[in-house]
Amino acid sequence: MALRGHGGVTFLDINDGSGKIQALIKVDKLGEKGYQFFLDVFDIADLVEIKGKLFKTKRGEKTIEAEDYKCFQRHLPCLKNGMDCKMLKKKFKEKDI
């Protein structure tokens, strides 16, 4: 997963080994809390599911506009922004998204 942010919009390149697709996450679709949580917690090696509508960009790239997301597996060691695994688990429980 590679991230490219532009204000309240972030593009992700998701690769499952068989191909690549672009995902678009936006503040107005996920809410400020859900959008910021994704940016703060998820890492490039995490296994994620993105649900949403499929469309093609002006450049012809297939893109999913995210309406919901889920993390299937965290990359270990799960350190990001100085958090250890216990802190990260607590943060997941505290967030209501």
Image: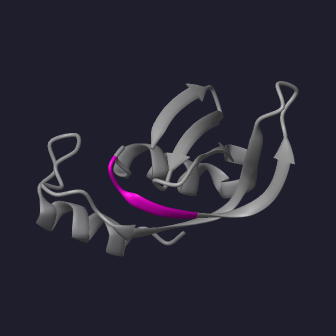
User: x and y percent of residue 25 in the render?
Assistant: 65, 46
Q: Which residues are magenta?
A: 45-49
Front-lying residue, 13 or 78 = 13
Q: Which residue does the image show at 74% across and 45% down from the upper left?
A: 63
Q: Is residue 81 above or below residue 6?
A: below
User: x and y percent of residue 73 in the render?
Assistant: 33, 68
Q: Quadrant of residue 78?
A: bottom left
Q: Which residue does the image show at 54% across and 54% down from the upper left?
A: 33
Q: Is residue 74 left or right of residue 36?
A: left
Q: Is residue 82 left or right of residue 91?
A: left
Q: Is residue 65 left or right of residue 91?
A: right
Q: Is residue 88 left or right of residue 44?
A: left
Q: Is residue 40 above or below residue 92?
A: above
Q: Quadrant of residue 52?
A: bottom right
Quarter the N terminus occupies:
top left
Type of secondary structure dominating the magenta stretch? strand
Q: Which residue does the image show at 16% across and 49% down from the upper left?
A: 79
Queried whether the magenta region covers residue 48, the answer comes back as: yes
User: x and y percent of residue 27 in the render?
Assistant: 67, 45
Q: Quadrant of residue 56?
A: top right
